């Protein structure tokens, strides 16, 4: 990924935070059929002295798990908040007119190797963790035990587990760091005026990653 130094994010806790908050990743592999991409939720697990591991699963009918090469890297892309940035928000537009539209975003690329597995007990533990993670905020969280065992067993038989051992992580936070303070202030106001959660999230990142703190 092309990352100008101003936009590079290397802090492990920040990268992990985005992967956890935006867990639906694009898993990209190269195999005999060429490039294949699947969109699957992945759970990030930190590992001491390592970039960590991603846990997920795909449908058994999805040929990606069989086709992916084992002698090269796979890529998992986590897309965080993103938003269009209008040049009308820049103070520089009034001063010089030398401005153009752009896009602000935060993204993590995880590179690593894939291991697949089909053991029912192991898959069940993975699914229990996955559902517990995403049901945690509900007052009555759903669990696998809420469905008939025979049904869950049939669902487990229809999937393949994936362990993605991360070899390196890249983070890019393109959030107006290259603009003067007055332009960044205009971006924050413009984004917040849109009244959308994802755009407010980008406004927060513009503030957090400003070369100098915004008031």
Image (tube, grey):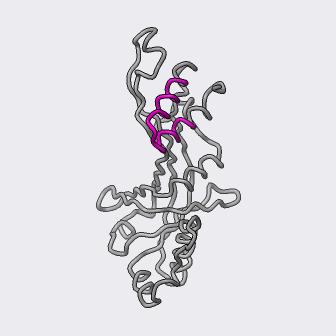
Residue 108 higher or lower than 136, as above or below: above
Query: Percent x, y for residue 15?
Result: 59, 48
Q: Which range of residues does the magenta coloring cover?
A: 185-204
Q: Residue at x 51, y 39 (%)?
A: 200
Comparing 186 with 12, the one in front is 186
Comparing 3 with 181, the one in front is 181
Q: Quadrant of residue 167 in the image?
A: bottom right
Q: Residue at x 45, y 61 (%)?
A: 71
Is 14 magenta? The answer is no
Q: Quadrant of residue 154 in the image?
A: bottom left
In the current view of this chain or complex, which residue is farthest to the top?
95
Query: Percent x, y for residue 187?
Result: 49, 27
Comparing 77 with 91, the one in front is 91
In the current view of this chain or complex, which residue is farthest to the right?
48
Q: Is the stretch drawn in magenta largely helix, strand or loop?
A: helix
Query: Percent x, y for residue 103?
Result: 42, 33
Is 197 magenta? The answer is yes
Query: Percent x, y for residue 178?
Result: 53, 24
Comparing 174 with 70, the one in front is 174
Residue 194 higher or lower than 39, as above or below: above
In the picture, the quarter occupied by the C terminus is top right
Residue 49 relative to residue 166: left or right: right
Q: Residue at x 48, y 51 (%)?
A: 78
Q: Residue at x 43, y 35 (%)?
A: 194
In the current view of this chain or complex, which residue is farthest to the left?
33
Numbered circles on residues, count: 0
Residue 211 higher or lower than 203, as above or below: above
């Amino acid at each position: 990924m092309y990352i100008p130094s101003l936009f590079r994010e290397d802090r492990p806790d920040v990268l992990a935070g985005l992967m956890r908050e935006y867990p639906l990743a694009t898993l990209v592999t190269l195999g005999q059929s060429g490039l294949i991409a699947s969109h699957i939720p992945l759970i990030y697990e930190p590992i001491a002295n390592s970039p960590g591991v991603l846990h997920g699963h795909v449908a058994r009918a999805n040929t990606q798990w069989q086709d992916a090469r084992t002698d090269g890297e796979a890529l998992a892309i986590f897309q965080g908040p993103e938003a269009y940035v209008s040049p009308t928000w820049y103070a520089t537009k009034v001063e010089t007119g030398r401005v153009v539209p752009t896009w602000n975003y935060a993204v993590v690329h995880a590179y690593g190797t894939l291991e697949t597995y089909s053991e029912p007990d192991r898959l069940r533990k993975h699914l229990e963790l996955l559902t517990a993670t995403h049901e945690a905020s509900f007052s009555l969280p759903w669990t696998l035990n809420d469905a008939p065992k025979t049904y869950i067993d049939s669902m487990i038989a229809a999937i393949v587990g994936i362990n993605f051992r991360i070899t390196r992580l890249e983070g890019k936070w393109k959030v107006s760091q290259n603009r003067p303070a007055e332009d960044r202030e205009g971006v924050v106001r413009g984004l917040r005026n849109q009244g959308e959660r994802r755009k407010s999230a980008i406004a927060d990142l513009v503030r957090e990653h400003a070369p100098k703190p915004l008031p």
